[in-house]
Amino acid sequence: MSMGRPTRDADDGRPEDWEAPGRALVRSAATDVVPPLADLGRVHIMGIAGAGMSGLARILLERGVAVSGCEARESLDVAALRALGADVSIGHSVEHLVASDTFVYTTAINPKHFELVAARASGMPVLRRAAALAAALEDRITVAISGTHGKTTTTSLLTVGAQACGVDPSFAIGGNLYETGRNAHLGTGPLAIVEADESDGSFLLTRPASAVVTNVEADHLENHGDLEGIFRAFEQFVDRVDPAGLLLTCADDEGARRIADYARGTGRRVLTYGERDDADIRVSGVLALPDAVEFDVAGPGLSKRHVRVASLVGRHIALNASAALALAADLGLDVDTVIGSWADFGGVHRRFESHGEGGGVRVYDDYAHHPTEILASLTAARASAGDGRLIAVFQPGTYSRTQTFAREFGEALATADIAVVMDIFPAREEPIPGVTGATISDLVPLPPGQVIFEPSYAAVPARVAAVARPGDLVLTMGIGNVYLLCDQIREACAQSGASA
């Protein structure tokens, strides 16, 4: 096995298992088998309350599949799944496998975890979440939204629009919709709208009737090896799109333009969207407001329309919404009804989500975890901050991403007035010597007093409250558990304000 570079299968050019220093063993999803739903039997889901896994559990339960699962701790999500009929245990144990026929895992779990190792050794089918989801939606017409950034927002907007049109689609999203409080649902209609994850190649388990590629950038290099590996995966994704279907790609993103060129070479129907003059669906007049985004859009099936998306902020939202609208038009949905549903859009959990105000300090949270996302989120938050200062609280996710993008993270965080950098949320990875949150904080080009590295998770609220003042806006960001600090930050700011 090579170290630091993926080995390649001589027959199909797909990545096999590979391992780099400090990184977990990863295998491409390209060759995974999707079993028939009827063959799953009783399904055990490891980490059942996670954002994606809980959605899978909901759909399986709605399909009548017996579901068990395990989690590290009690939570509202665990309680909700139990109420739906899932048998959820707290803690991990090989005993969970005794009554199970199929084991489902996420690649966020370290492949050396004893419960996953025991499942593989047992001989039972061991599936990624995406394979189990594909089985659960085997009889649906699937629309897949993929890309390095913007998947959740685009999927959410299309889902809400389809629901407003009375379609009742099945959906699986990486965040809970405020309208329903759900991240997944088994609809009564034939349409399924899914967020297709490229991180570990899981989107290669879908066979979409139509699809979106929002953008393509270097990320998840621990899985794909390099940017060319990412492009190869997206090309395989295009190959799985129905030749009679539609592929929508962003004209403003060079990576997506490359995928569009590849798709045209395969004979597929391609439409582009964006602000560039050569976009098929043209976005113009973007107005980023403190609590909404407005823009004009024109193109095939749309004529020219004005769109307002409530509760989401930042110019990038106009691109996500235009992709959702173009796909809605191609699906035959009433465009005006879709646009109307977004005027009162409630938003998505962990996408510029408000956590209230304390001591005159507003606290928000966002899932941003890549330098491009950090920059976009902070730029949008800057408009909402008004005359107040912008305080970024960033929890880096994984050692490998921190090592690869440390300088880019530092530059993006300089968009804030004050940057608070936490230590790394490791996910499945083992530590890389010398790589910590300080690797990023040392590279933030702000005056020393405006950059704080706080390695203690519990100490973060007090550190933020010590520098915050009335009128400021605090934005927490990251893939880990930083969002759990939002209420504590708000309360610490309130107490600090009262003391002052």
Image (tube, rainbow, N blue to C red):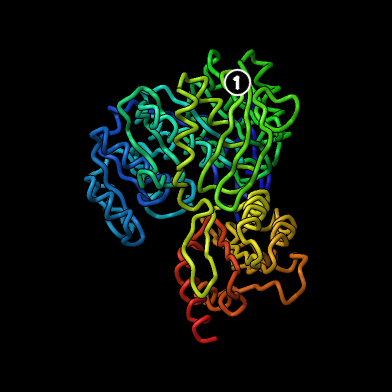
Q: Is residue 483 visible?
A: yes
Residue lying furthest bottom? 499
**For residue 480, above or below residue 27:** below
Q: Percent x, y for residue 157?
A: 49, 37
**Which of 349/139 is in front?**
349
Q: Report the number of discs.
A: 1
161 horizontally vs 271: left or right? left
Q: Is residue 400 visible?
A: no
Q: Percent x, y for residue 391?
A: 63, 67
**Which of 85/67 is in front?**
85
The quadrant in which residue 385 appears is: bottom right
The quadrant in which residue 475 appears is: bottom right
106 horizontally vs 221: left or right? left
Please name the residue shown 28% across and 49% down the image: 81
Please give the residue where the numbered disc 1 appears in the rendered image. Answer: 303
Amino acid tagged 1: Ser
Quadrant housing the N terminus: top right
Quadrant housing the C terminus: bottom right
258 horizontally vs 193: left or right? right
**For residue 72, above or below residue 492:** above
Q: Percent x, y for residue 36?
A: 34, 25
Q: Percent x, y for residue 234?
A: 62, 30
Please name the residue shown 60% across and 31% down the image: 213
Neighbor class of circle 1 (other Cα within 10 Å; few <14, some 14-19, many 20+) is: few
**Which of 394/69 is in front?**
394
Please name the residue shown 62% across and 29% down the image: 297
Q: Secondary structure at mark 1?
A: strand
